[in-house]
Image (spheres, helix red, strand yellow):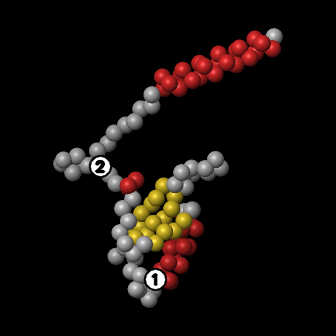
């Protein structure tokens, strides 16, 4: 039986929401109804706003869809915290450069 997955795509400058592709794998290529089935999915793709529809007969494992689990089989949850020290230094450098340029104009 075919299955459906979502493949997240890189965001562009004008994207209102994250772009994604709809991936259908394990599709039966010998099925006489495959063409009608794909046309139905093309309509679904348009309705949900997917950028592309990718169909494969093989099983496609998308790394972004893997959920890490602990030894007991529970999903591992983790939180990523940004390191803003480097960002703070970059902002301070840009402020100093702007102050030097402004002092040269006065």
SS category of the residue bearing label 2: loop
Q: Which quadrant is home to the N terminus?
A: bottom left
Nearest to the observer: residue 82 or residue 17: 82
Q: How far is disc 2 from disc 1 in space, using C-alphas? A: 34 Å
Give percent across and percent down for residue 105.
81, 14
Q: In the figure, is residue 99 to the left or right of 31?
A: right
- The answer to whether 105 is drawn above or below residue 12 in the figure is above
- Which image quadrant for residue 19? bottom right
Q: Residue at x 40, y 53 (%)?
A: 64
Mark on residue 63?
Answer: none
Marked residue nearer the N-terminal end (2 or 1): 1
- The image shows residue 34, relative to residue 52, as above or below, that is below
Q: Which residue is mark 1?
A: 34
Tell me where residue 88 appears, x and y as whole percent.
53, 22
Q: Residue at x 54, y 62 (%)?
A: 50
Q: How many marks?
A: 2
Image location of residue 97, percent across then percent down = 67, 18
Q: Is residue 101 visible?
A: yes
* In front of the other: 95 or 47: 95
Q: Which residue is mark 2?
A: 68
Q: Looking at the image, is 14 positioned above or below residue 96?
A: below
């Amino acid at each position: 039986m075919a299955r459906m997955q979502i493949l997240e795509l890189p965001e562009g400058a004008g994207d209102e929401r994250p772009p994604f592709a709809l991936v259908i794998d394990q599709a039966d290529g010998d099925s006489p109804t495959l063409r009608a089935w794909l046309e139905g999915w093309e309509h679904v793709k348009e309705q949900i706003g997917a950028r592309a529809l990718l169909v494969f007969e093989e099983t496609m494992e998308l790394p972004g869809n893997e959920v890490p689990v602990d030894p007991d089989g529970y999903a591992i949850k983790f939180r990523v915290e940004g390191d803003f020290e480097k960002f703070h230094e970059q902002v301070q450098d840009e402020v100093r450069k702007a102050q030097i340029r402004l002092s040269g104009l006065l």
